[in-house]
Image (spheres, rainbow, N blue to C red):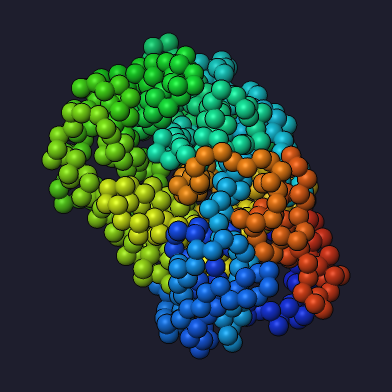
Amino acid sequence: MLVGLTSRGTRALLVISLSLILAPAIGRAADADVRVNSVGYLPARAKGVSVLGGAATTFTVRRSADGTSAFEGTLPAPAADPGSNDMVAPGDFSALTEAGRFYVDVPGVGRSVDFAIGDDVYRRPFVAAMLGFYGWRCGTAVSFAFSGDAFAHAACHLGDGYLDYLGQTGAMRDGRGGWHDAGDFGKYTGNAGFTLGMLLSAFERHPGGITQAPLPIPEAGGEAPDYLAELRWELEWILKMSYGGGDGRVSHKLTALGFEGFVAPEADLQARYFVPFSSAATADFVAALAQASRIYRPYDAAFADRCLAAARTAYAYLTANTANTPPDQAAFTTGGYQTSDPDDRLWAAAEMWETTGEDAPLADVEARINAVSATATLVAADFDWGSVRNLGLFTYLLSSRAGRTPAVVDRVRASAMTSADAIVAAHDASRYGRGVMNYYWGSNGSVARTAMLLAIANRLSGDARYLDVAADQLAYLFGRNHYNRSQVTGLGIDPPLHPHHRPSAADAIASPYPGLLVGGGTTATGWMDDQDMYMVNEVAINWNGALVYALALFLPDGAWPPARSELDAGAGGDAATDGGVDATPGTFGEPGLATRRGGCGCASAPAGTSWIGLALVGASVLISRRRRARQVRVATTSDK
C-alpha cells in the first residue's frame, strides 16, 4: 500500500475554504444528528433512525413532497453506542410501508436527509457497485459515465507477465486481463477466488434480481446475463494463473516487485511477474472454477467444461500433495495474502462435490468438517479472504444432493444459526444497527458480508428478522453510522471523495470512481476520507464483492425498467443531489447516484452560503487530486 504526504498548502486552502461556508451552515448543523439510510429502505424490511443527543422523545417521518406526516414514533433515552460512545436514541419506523420519498423530523434536533422507500431502492447501488468491478478491469481500455463525469483509462499491463520466479528467466506467459485487486494494480489468485466465490454465490442463491440486470459493459446483451459477463472477465484471467501443461499448481499472484506510484493504470510500466504457487491459492482456484462450471453451463457449455477441467487438474494436485505450501514471495513487497490452507481445501472439496456429485470430494469435505474441533467455532460470524471455510460450509449446507451425513449437516446447521444469532446480538447492541462488533482493516466489507450468513439463517429458519438485520447493515454503510456519511463512493450522503485508489487519484476528475466500498475505520471513530490512509480508506474487490452480495439479496425479481425510466427521480435517490444531476440517457448520472463536487455534499447551497467558498472548496480538492496524480511516491507494503 502507498503512503504519501498531502501538500500542506493544499490542506491550508481547504481549511480556509471550509471556513467560508461553515458559518452560514451552522443553522443546519443539527441535521447531521438525525442519521438514516440515505439510499433508502425496502417497504417490507426494517427501517431505523439514529438520533444523537438531545432530549427528544418523539420523531415524525414526513413526506418530502409536502411535509405531511406519514408516521409518528417514539424515541428511548439516548444510550452509549459500543465502541464510539456516541449517545444515540434509535427509532424504528418499520411499520411505514408506503412508497415514496421521506425525511425524519425530530423536534429540537433537526431533520434527516431525504430518502426513498420502495422495492427498487437498491437497483442503482447494485449497478454502481458492479461498475466498480468494470472500472477495475486490467488489460483493456475502460470507459463509462457516471453522475456527469466520464471515467476512463487506456489498456494497461499488456506485458503481464514474466516467469523469472517460476524458473524461466526472461520468458513470458499470458497473464493479461482480470481485475486489479484493490487500490493497487496487483492481481492475487486467493483474493480473486474468494471474491468470485461471493459473487457466484449471489447469482446462484439470489438470481431473481440479477439475471436481467443491465450493466453498461461491452459484453452487455449477450447470451449470458451481463452480471456473469463481468465475472467472466476475472474467471478468464484466473484460468491463466495455472502453471499449465497438466501441472495442477497455480501461481499465488501476478504483480511487480513493489507497489506502483499513484499513476494511471496504463502509466504503470513496471515489469510484472508470476509468483510461485501456494496450496491455498490453488485451492481457491479450484473452488471458484468448480462453482463457475455449474453456473455458466446453461449459457456456455464449452466454457463450463474449461473451468471444470482446470479445477479437476488442480484438485488432483492438492489431493496428491497434502502439505500446506506457502508461496515464495521473498523478492516481492506487494500484498502478501498469505494464509494456511485447511479452510481453502475444505471450500475446494465442497465446490467440487456440489458440481460433480462424486463421492471422493464429499468424503473430503466431510472429513475436513469433522477435523474442526467440536469446541471450535465451525461457521464464523465474521470472515474474509484469510478464512474462507464459510464458503464451503454454505455450499455443503444448502446442497440438494443426496449422500451427506446427517450428523455433519446438523452440526453445520447449528453452528450457522449460532453465528447468525451472534450477528443479531451485535446488531441489537449497536445504536447504529452494526452487526460486526470489532473494527479492523476492511471491516466495512465484513459488515456487508454478514448478509451471506443472515440470508442462510432466514432460509433455514423462515425468520424474517435475519433479513431485517441484513438490511440494517446496508443502512449502516449508507449513512446510519458514526460519521453520518456513506461508505461507498458516489452513493448516498457525503460519500468518500478520496479513496486509496490509484485510478481515482491519477485522473483529473474531482469525483472518485463510483461504487467502491472503502474499508472503514480500524476503530469505531477512526475512519478518515484521506487517500493516504490505506488502512481505513482503501478499496478492494473482496469488500465490493460482499457489498454486491448484500445488494443482490434485496433486488426485486424480474425485468428491470427501461433505461429512460431508470433515470427518473425516485428510489435509491440521494436527497442532497436529486435536484442537480446529469440525467442524460446512457450515462449513470440519474438521481440516486450522487454527484459530489469539491466535497460540498450538495447540489444547491443553504440560504446564505457563500458561492465563493463553495468554489474554493471545489478548487482545493481538484488541485489536491491533480498534485497527487503527478507525484511519484515511495511504496510501502502492508501484508493483506
Image location of residue 485, percent across then percent down: 59, 64
Closer to the camera in the image, 566 or 438: 566
Picture layout, residue 610 above or below residue 327: below
Picture layout, residue 115 above or below residue 541: below
- Say whether residue 288 is visible: yes
Residue displayed at 18% across by 28% down: 403
Count of marks placed on residues: 0
Image location of residue 527, percent across then percent down: 54, 63
Closer to the camera in the image, 233 or 558: 558
Closer to the camera in the image, 232 or 630: 232
Image location of residue 31, percent across then percent down: 63, 77
Image location of residue 118, percent across then percent down: 55, 56
- Which residue occupies the extreme top position in the image? 245
Q: Is residue 176 left or right of residue 370?
A: right
Residue displayed at 46% across by 24% down: 296
Picture layout, residue 31 above or below residue 481: below
Q: Quadrant of residue 307?
A: top left
Residue displayed at 45% across by 16% down: 301
- Which residue occupies the extreme left position in the image? 407
- Say whether residue 495 is visible: no
Q: Is residue 409 left or right of residue 179?
A: left
Residue displayed at 79% across by 61% down: 618
Q: Quadrant of residue 431?
A: bottom left
